Amino acid sequence: MEKLTFLGIGPKIARITIPYLVIAIVLTILFPAIFTFGKNAQGPLLIAGIVLLAVALAFYIVTLYLMVPGIRNNHLVTGGVYRLCRNPLYSALLLFLIPGLGLVLNSWIIPTASLLGCIAFRKFIHEEEELLERLFRDEYRMYRSKTSLFFPNPFGKK
């Protein structure tokens, strides 16, 4: 019997996104005149970045709290942050963590790693979707029809 796995497509997204992210961080540190918003923007960006990092951390922790028992028991998790979107772990990292890091480091190039991550997510997510449909059939189809794929939406799918 097929089972859920903890990593999913995460390693595939990471192989593409992390090298780019590291290069963006190094470029920001080595060439701040080119890759930052400037010293005047540092204060407000730092505050906004800290807020995004806090949201990312909270989203990530709550997602793991819900996801780990679901994987262990091989059941579909649809409550909590999973009501907002079907992939809250990827959302936390790509929509909040990476942009938050970019703002904290006053960098315009670091958040572009999220764009690359989103492209990788779209390329590979079908693998997870197909597994969930095989495992949970109509229950997953119903959940998928009501819940956003990636962007958190408290109102459900339109």
Image (cartoon, rainbow, N blue to C red):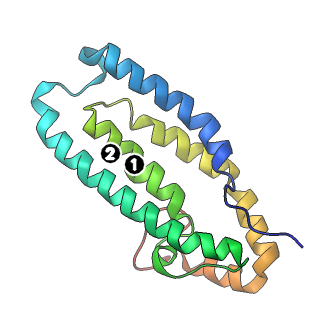
**Do labels 1 and 2 touch, CB within 8 Å?**
yes
Crowding near pointer 2: few (<14 within 10 Å), some, many (20+)? many
* Identity, as a three-letter code, of the amino acid under mark 2: Gly
Question: Residue 46 vs residue 10: left or right?
Answer: left
Callout 2 secondary element: helix
Question: Residue 20 vs residue 143: left or right?
Answer: left
Percent position of residue 48, x then y: 21, 48
The residue at 64%/76% (across/down) is 70
Name the one closer to the observer, 27 or 148: 27
Instruction: Estimate the spatial distance between the alpha carbons at disc 1 and disc 2, rounded to whole Å.
Output: 5 Å
Percent position of residue 39, x then y: 13, 25
Dividing the picture into quadrants, the one containing residue 51 is: bottom left
Name the one closer to the observer, 158 or 3: 3
- In this rendering, the answer to whether 120 lies above or below 35 is below
- Marker disc for residue 59: none
Give the residue pinned by disc 1.
Answer: 97
Marks counted in the figure total: 2
The residue at 82%/74% (across/down) is 134
